[in-house]
Image: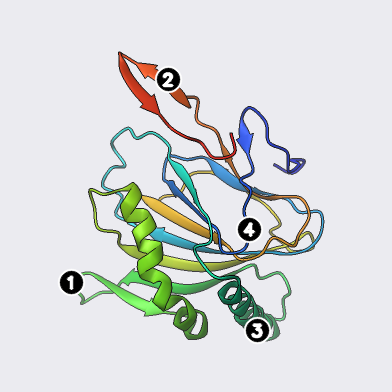
């Protein structure tokens, strides 16, 4: 990943994402963040269904791009709030290497029958709360057999001079994830995924079609 360039290949795809676009993928998709040349990339990650009941079952990797999920004005507002939160955290911790802010988290607390929701950054949450049904609907359309259960939201910032300017190839522990791109005024790098071996074809006389974006 350290030397990866923003170039699509037979194995790797960098989806053409713009401000407000969302990527949905399930837990079997291998993906990562390639290093940047200049500028800063901002994004929001929404983690659904942490219980992952299908973890013991085989699933085909799934990925889908959804254009224009958020207005650009909302993206810009969240970036400004995120930068303000980063500045406050950096001043408090005397570090300029913070790259992630927890916005919302469901935690198990002793004495409660289940998970307890915690809003950890109220300013960003207040902006996103009206859009949660829209984001949840993306998950529901791709996984109709279960009601989406939002467990975590993070605001991410990546740049060439930050401690974490890339994310190694990995799969998520939760069932479904939606990542929203907040800006695209940076050079190089960015979100990519590894194309599954199967794209379109027949298996045992059954027609299987997966329309991998930007393939």
Query: Which of the numbered marks, if any, corresponds to residue 113?
Result: 1
According to the image, label 4 marks what residue?
Answer: 18
Q: Nearer the viewer, mark 3 or mark 1?
A: 3
Q: Identify the element where label 1 is drawn.
A: loop
Q: Residues within 10 Å of mark 4 (few under 14, many from 20)?
A: some
According to the image, label 3 marks what residue?
Answer: 84
Q: Residue at x 45, y 83 (%)?
A: 126
> Residues under labels 4 and 1: Cα distance?
41 Å
Sequence-wise, the earlier of marks 3 and 4 is 4
Q: Give the vertical position of 65 relative to 203 (above or below).
A: below
Where in the figure is residue 42, as x and y percent of width and height?
A: 64, 65
In the picture, residue 51 is in which quadrant? bottom left
Question: What quarter of the picture does the C terminus occupy?
Answer: top right
Q: Nearer the viewer, residue 46 or 111?
A: 46
> Residues under labels 3 and 4: Cα distance?
23 Å
Q: Residues within 10 Å of mark 3 (few under 14, many from 20)?
A: few
Query: Which of the numbered marks, if any, corresponds to residue 201?
Result: 2
Q: Identify the element where label 2 is drawn.
A: strand
Outermost residue, top side: 204
> Residues under labels 3 and 2: Cα distance?
49 Å
Mark 3 vs 4: CB contact within 8 A: no
């Amino acid at each position: 990943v350290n030397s990866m360039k923003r170039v699509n290949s037979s194995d790797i795809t960098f989806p053409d994402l713009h401000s407000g676009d969302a990527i949905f993928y399930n837990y079997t998709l291998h993906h990562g963040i390639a290093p940047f040349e200049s500028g800063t990339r901002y994004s929001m990650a929404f983690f659904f269904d942490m219980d992952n009941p299908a973890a013991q079952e085989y699933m085909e990797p799934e990925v889908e791009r959804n254009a224009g999920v958020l207005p650009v004005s909302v993206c810009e507002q969240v970036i400004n709030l995120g930068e303000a939160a980063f500045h406050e955290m950096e001043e408090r911790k005397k570090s300029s290497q913070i790259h992630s802010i927890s916005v919302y988290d469901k935690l198990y607390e002793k004495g409660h029958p289940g998970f307890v929701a915690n809003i950890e950054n109220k300013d960003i949450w207040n902006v996103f709360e009206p859009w949660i049904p829209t984001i949840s609907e993306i998950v529901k359309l791709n996984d109709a057999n279960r009601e989406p259960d939002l467990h975590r939201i993070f605001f991410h910032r990546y740049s060439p001079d930050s401690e974490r300017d890339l994310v190694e190839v990995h799969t998520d522990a939760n069932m479904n994830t939606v990542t929203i791109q907040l800006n695209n005024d940076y050079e190089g790098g960015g979100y990519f995924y590894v194309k599954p071996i199967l794209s379109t074809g027949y298996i045992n006389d059954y027609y299987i079609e997966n329309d991998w974006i930007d393939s």
